[in-house]
Amino acid sequence: MAPDIPPTLRVRSLSCERDGRALFVGLSFELAAGAALQIVGANGAGKSTLIRTLIGSASDFQGEILWGDRPYPHSLAQLRQSLLYIGHNAGIRRGLTPLENLTWYGASRQAALAALDAVDLYGFEDLPCQQLSAGQNRRVALARLYLPGVPQLWILDEPLAALDVHGVATLEKRMTAHLAQGGSMLLTSHQPVAIEALSRLNLSDFTPHSYGEDLDGPREEVAHEY
Ligand SMILES: Nc1ncnc2c1ncn2[C@@H]1O[C@H](COP(=O)(O)OP(=O)(O)OP(=O)(O)O)[C@@H](O)[C@H]1O
């Protein structure tokens, strides 16, 4: 029997507006197994808005998003089973230690310690995260990428933020290994990311020229509600 091919994430003619202002219009791309896409763009171009839309946290969009053959919102439950999302604020509970944060995500103590070691946090596992630096807190979040059974689709908002040169290189190595194993990844970053298989998409290219421009068509007829 042929091995299961992980689903492709498909975005077709996607448009988003906030506060009556079109952020991006007519965005289309596909993210298949083994592929990686870096979303770039000016501050305020809508990168985090796009990510919130893709993970199903924001439902006010026009166009179509599909996971495999099924459109949102029907495929969101399936997508979430395959998704590892690390947001802009890293999702760290600052009152907990790094070890407690990872076990909160369901990791065993042994797996959590190995993952923290992989991001060079050996010796910091029992300190409250509020006593760690910004880069160390980012590393706690990124340690999730090293836990056993890591999901296939990674969606990462500014994962390189606050990391030092060695931290960036370590992360790029982990991302490359994930892609080689058939994983897929969409990330935002203002910095270059040294991964061979990475495509880049500039969201600013999809920004309408005049601010305040409304999206085409009556919203009530096409806006998704879920
Ligand atoms: N819930 C919301 N309500 C109103 N405006 C919003 C909302 N979410 C985002 N915006 C606006 O949408 C625009 C895009 O924000 P977003 O955070 O997606 O940009 P970004 O490209 O990620 O920016 P940066 O590079 O600065 O992180 C901003 O002008 C922001 O103020």
Image: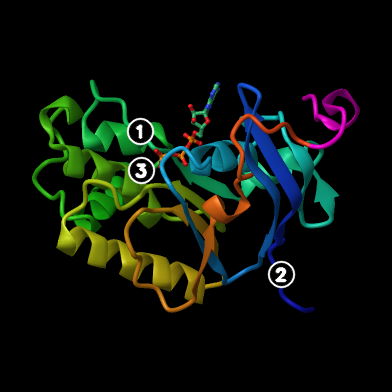
Label placed on residue 108: 3
Instruction: Indicate the colouring scheme.
Output: rainbow
Write the start and end of the magenta stretch as one range. 216-226
Between disc 1 and disc 2, the foreground one is 1
Position of residue 166 measured from the top left corner of the image (x, y, whole percent): 16, 63
Position of residue 28 measured from the top left corner of the image (x, y, whole percent): 71, 57
Q: Quadrant of the C terminus?
A: top right
Query: Is 57 above or below relative to 19?
Result: below
Q: In the displayed image of the protein, which residue is found farthest to the front?
A: 210
Residue drawn 39% across and 42% down? 107
- Kindly identify which residue carries mark 2: 5
Q: The disc labelled 3 sits on which kind of residue?
A: Ser
Q: Give the SS element for disc 3.
A: loop
Query: Is 196 above or below relative to 60?
Result: below
Q: Residues within 10 Å of mark 3 (few under 14, many from 20)?
A: some
The Cα–Cα distance between marks 1 and 3, rounded to whole angstroms, is: 24 Å
Q: Residues within 10 Å of mark 2 (few under 14, many from 20)?
A: few
In the displayed structure image, the side of residue 168 where residue 144 appears, left or right: right
- Kindly identify which residue carries mark 1: 89
Between disc 1 and disc 3, the foreground one is 1
The reply to whether the C-beta atoms of the residues labelled 1 and 2 are less than 8 Å apart is no
Q: Earlier in the sequence, mark 1 or mark 3?
A: 1
Residue drawn 56% across and 58% down? 152
Q: Give the SS element for disc 2.
A: loop
Between disc 3 and disc 2, the foreground one is 2
Taken as a whole, is the magenta stretch helix, strand or loop?
A: loop
Q: The disc labelled 2 sits on which kind of residue?
A: Ile
